Amino acid sequence: MLGSQIPSRAASPPRLAALRFVSIRSRTAWEIVALVSVLVVGTVARLHDLGEDSLWLDEAFSVYVAKQPLGRMMEIITAHDTPPPLYYALLHAWLGLGLGDQAQSVRLLSVALGIASICVIYLCGREIGGPHVGLAAALLLAVSPFRVWYSQEARMYALLALLCGLSALLLWRALMRGGAGAWIGYTLTTSLALYTQISAVFFVFGEGVAVLLVLLARSSHAESGRVSWGGVASAVARVWRGEQRTLGVWIVSQLVIALLWLPWLPFFLRQGEIYQRFWIPAPTWVTVKQVLFDLTAIHFPHWLMPRGMELLVIGGVALALLGGRSLTRPAYVFFLALFLAPMLAMYAVSQVKPVFVSRALIYVSMPYILLMAAGLVSLKRWNVGAALLGLVVLLNLVSLYRIYGVVEKEQWDRAASHVLANAAPHELVLFVAADAQIAFDYYAERDVKPLERRGLPVDVLSVGPLEPRMEEHDLARMDALIEGRDSFWLVQSHTAFADPTELARRHADERYRRVDAQELQGVTLFRYDASAAQAVNRRQIPAR
């Protein structure tokens, strides 16, 4: 009897190993199914109504630049724009695939970049908090109205977010595991981010702060078993003693990033000379609140509940701060620094040169969402965390509903259709701002009706700034263009910057009889009968 029991005991370890293998496979299968489901949700969110809205002015400019030969593309970027060339070059290659230049086709590039970002945040979350944090973060990013909005726009922000997300992931791996591959990958993706949008420099600054905090926490723990921040000098010395190799490699990576970006420096300096006038005011704490609201729930109808914006911002930030309960100290300080440091740095710089806008900070949405996901997972009762996750997703779906059905981009398709349907051949069309002609031409270029299109105060791309401001002395040129014509159109857009006092429109109303007016989203059309101008109303404008 004893002998008959021995084989049974001997067979037990293999059976246990088989059970463990089946358990691991089932967990892996569950995780894969969950991730694929999240990717499907994120894909549907980004493809829904993709071509419904017209390309707005900046998107039309992206397409115009991307259609140019590479040499001409560089000329336009350096003479008239502020971002570096990577996105335009990528869109140039995308258009070369033969998918067409319709709104839906050109926006598909940003959709693909946005879907890739879901995978990146999943990998980040899985590394720092396990599969539950990874999947929760991926789901929040998949339905994030802020990220969906810029994944449906033919601009560089989806690319910027993806590259900064990859940079953060690879930097974290380099700090935790070392290895040449992670450091090289971090260096390259960070350099590409800087060639996408110059605002990436604030993210690089945030990564520097994150690295120093992680190394400080790690070296303090190694020496005393607890974090003792002490004085600044002793803290730096402690990091240098305990993390000399890692700190040295990071410094080398920063030097390589600077060298890789150096060829763009002359072009960057030229771009800086073009735009001396700021198109946004210096930020205040109200601006910070607006940016945090955009990151949390852009386009949510917060006015339906008392202090709705403040409640949403406080709720999102509170969840992010809770993330420290489920993450290690290095992981928490790393991603908290990536969230806060770029915003603080950009806020400080914007007191001198205002650049503090939410889209320029799109990269902080990744660490913000990661920390929110970690905060949800940290709740002791899983059903409470699941309920809160469901609530956040529901709020995001409300915002997405408004993005799809309520919030509209500039209606250049309708503007071009109305003018082309009602204009006489060779009729004059004046554009304020001047670069609005690019968006108009995008929708009018296939029409055979010839029109004369001119910009105010100057023709598009004839001076450095894309939207030079209308001044009193520019009215003489406007009159010269109109002289001898029976009628003309005035197309207004971006007036807050290009013509804040509406000089062109007021001047036209004083001198000519208005016969048509159409107010569209972001665009206003006026048609005037120039032959019926009354001499008594004419102002004597000195010739230039």
Image (cartoon, rainbow, N blue to C red):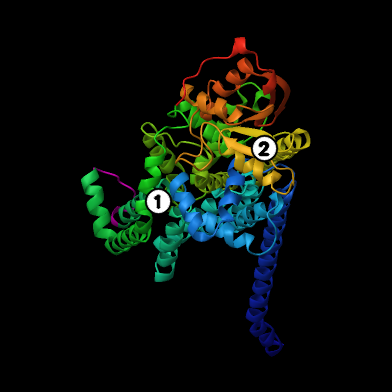
Query: Tag 1, which secondary structure?
Result: helix
> What label does residue 409 carry, if any?
2
Please give the range of residues in magenta: 223-231
Give the overall secondary structure of the magenta segment: loop
Instruction: Give above or below for 29 relative to 456.
Output: below
Q: Is residue 527 visible?
A: yes
Count of numbered marks = 2
Residue at x-position 55% and y-position 50%: 156
- Between the residue at mark 2 and the residue at mark 1, the CA separation in whole angstroms equals 31 Å
Three-letter code, disc 1: Val
Task: Name which quarter of the figure residue 488 lies in.
Answer: top right
| Magenta span includes 191 | no
Residue at x-position 24% and y-position 59%: 241
Q: Is residue 82 visible?
A: no
Q: Which quadrant is the C terminus positioned in?
A: top left
Residue 306: x and y in percent read: 64, 21
Three-letter code, disc 2: Lys
Q: Nearer the viewer, mark 2 or mark 1?
A: 2
